[in-house]
Amino acid sequence: MWETVILALIVAKIKGYKLKSLFRTWQIYPVLIFESIYLILQINIFRGNYNFLKYANILETLYLSSYLFLILKYEQYISAIIGSIFIFIGTFFNKIAIGANGGTMPVFPTLSYLTGYATPDAFSKVDDIHVLGNSSTKLKFLTDIIDVGYSILSIGDIFIRVFVFIIIFNTIKHMNRREYMYD
């Protein structure tokens, strides 16, 4: 989800907010640590090592929980509620896709085949809910169809990432307002 954090930083910079304050507070570092762990997971997948995948769900829960430090420190309660609604919607969409497809999440790699992130035989090696999508896939628009080359996302995954964007962006905005008040 590094791209979501980077997108929030870019949008904040375009809006004229200073980013330095964010990196002067320890509350951002648990987020960045879990982002780094997620990046290591992605690199391992590229290298054909799927051992970490069995921990992906718990890592995602810990990762999203790491945002609590920012939420509590910078009183991002409304942002957290709005972001949580996006997580709920995203999770709901993913559950619908999984339910419609017999407990599996069909994946439709395109660009990932070119980058080497996905291989046709990878889905048989990994004991996971993700399976290679085919013509019998139901509700394809809710499955993993958004291929960015190093990850394949569903619409639900995008909704979940909105939470990350909202918290990072609004924390920067809050910090800048506070700095402006004390200048």
Image (cartoon, helix red, strand yellow):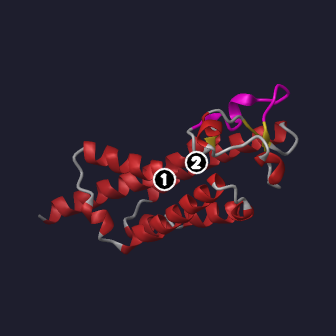
Q: Amino acid at mark 2?
A: Ile
Closer to the camera, 16 or 124? 124
Q: Quadrant of residue 149?
A: top right
**Residue 64 in view, yes or no:** no
Residue at image position (39%, 70%) is 73
Q: Residue furthest top?
A: 135
Instruction: Residue 44: tell me if it is visible.
Output: yes
Q: How far across and how far down the image is residue 34, in percent?
A: 53, 66
State the SS at label 2. helix
Measured along the vertical axis of the image, is residue 55 above or below residue 168? Answer: below
Q: Amino acid type of disc 1?
A: Val
Q: Looking at the magenta stretch, what is its main secondary structure?
A: loop
**Magenta stretch containing residue 5, yes or no?**
no
Residue at 55% x, 65% y is: 37
Of 27 and 126, nearer the camera is 126
Residue 160 is labelled as 2
Instruction: Give the x, y percent position of residue 126.
Output: 79, 54
Badge 1: residue crowd in 10 Å (few <14, some 14–19, many ≥20):
many
Quadrant where the C terminus is found in the figure: bottom left
Quick one: SS at disc 1? helix
At a point 78% along the width and 38% down the height, the residue shown is: 132
Across the whole image, how many numbered discs are drawn on residues?
2
| Residue topped by disc 1 | 164
- Is residue 161 shown left or right of residue 58? left
